Amino acid sequence: MKLETIAIHAGNEIESNRAVIQPITLSTTFERGEDGGYPGGFMYTRAGNPNRQSLENVLAGLEGGSDACAFSSGNAAGSAIFQSLDHGCHILAPTDMYHGMRNLLNVVFEGIIEVSYINLADLQEVENAIRPETCLIWIETPSNPLLSITDIAAIVDLAKKHNIRVACDNTFATPVFQQPLALGADLVMHATTKYLGGHSDVLGGALVTRSKDLFWEKIRNVQELSGAVPSPFDCYMTIRGIKTLPYRMRGHAENAMNIAGYLLKHPRVEAVFYPGLESHAGFATAGKQMSGFSGMLSFLVKGGKEEALRIVNATTIFIQASSLGGVESLIEHRASVEGPHSKTPQNLIRVSVGLENIHDLLDDLGSALQVGLK
Ligand SMILES: *Cc1c(COP(=O)(O)O)cnc(C)c1O
């Protein structure tokens, strides 16, 4: 099956009553058979539930993996990987790692996991940072908020030589535009909260694995025993979002490309970060490993924090809010979201381009950029 078909059918288990759409199974427990077994295949919802199984099926199918684990948030998914690492393990992560994940490592795993934050675009820097106890390289591409691109295949090559596992946060690209497992990564992580759910109304996370190895068994155990699992309703909502993912992503990418081109020529804009632009540092690598450039972009306005804040407060269609990947366009001053330690430029604005009509979006941005003028 191709992606569009997988998205619609792989997460939809039709039951004996022949309902076309799988119902939500709220039952937390499942009846035993005479022999004490579980003929329905389920025992207790923390360990497994029909809706979660369907969500995991469609996620594994979309990423071309052999199995998937769904979690109650993207951070819980990432956490399951970190919890499954051996003690004393050292990991390499990008300097511009998603700040929530970075905080997770720095706060919850402080003293348990040692992390070196490096520039993954510089392969020499990666090689130099590898130690005997390095056990994981964490990739996030495109990254947040500068949309930096990491060469997944090149990192995998390097990691293989040193027997290091590679995990890739594929939230921004989605499996529609980028398939890290096919490029050799061992694990893919998603905040399904974003494009997969796609409507800003359900939190969730996922891991997809290339092989069902011993490490994957540990992750399954963390999922079941730590219990950060999505509810049946959350699974249903995420599956519902996924059905239209391939079509939504085309719209997000088309609108984002248009907006990036518009901003590039705008006199009030200093720089635009979008991997689909030839001027972007990661353009060549993105073209090699992505089949589309997704819907996230950021730009620097001429001026500083004040000018940037004035613009994000002047839009009427773009809503000033965090998060991304929904059908509605969002805009934000990223440095204020990331807090006082943020290295994000004060004049940077991040945009999650939605599926509204492109002319309305361009008009809205155009007027907001005018309001910013003194
Ligand atoms: C949102 C996000 C996360 C975390 O997901 P939550 O569902 O908020 O826990 C991780 N990585 C990226 C790239 C994200 O955008």
Image (cartoon, rainbow, N blue to C red):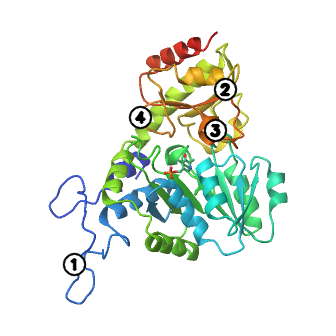
Distance from Cα at disc 1 to Cα at disc 3: 48 Å
Q: Earlier in the sequence, mark 2 or mark 1?
A: 1
Q: Is residue 290 left or right of residue 241?
A: right
Is mark 2 in CB contact (under 8 Å) with mark 1? no
Q: At label 1, which amino acid type do we have?
A: Glu
Of circles 2 and 1, which is in front? 2
Specify the quadrant of the image occupied by residue 336: top right
Answer left or right for 314 relative to 148.
left
- Could you tell me residue 297's position as x and y percent? 59, 32
The outermost residue toward the top is 374
Question: Which residue type carries mark 2?
Answer: Lys
Label drawn at residue 327: 4
The foreground one among 128 and 4 is 128
Whether residue 326 is situated above or below residue 23 in the rendered picture? above
The amino acid on which the numbered mark 3 sits, given as a three-letter code, is Pro
Tell me the residue at 70%/58% (across/down): 156
Disc 2 target residue: 305
Sequence-earlier tag: 2 or 3: 3
Callout in the foreground (2, 3): 2
Instruction: Give the residue at x 45% y 20%.
Output: 316
Where is 283 relative to 202, above or below? above
- The type of residue carrying mark 4 is Val
Q: Which residue is mark 3?
A: 145
Write down the quadrant of residue 161 in the picture.
bottom right
Is ligand 1 closer than 8 angstroms to the Cβ of mark 3?
no
Q: Is residue 281 left or right of residue 286?
A: right
Residue 81 visible in image: yes
At a point 55% along the width and 24% down the height, the residue shown is: 312
In the displayed image of the protein, which residue is found farthest to the bottom?
Answer: 35
Q: Which residue is mark 1?
A: 31
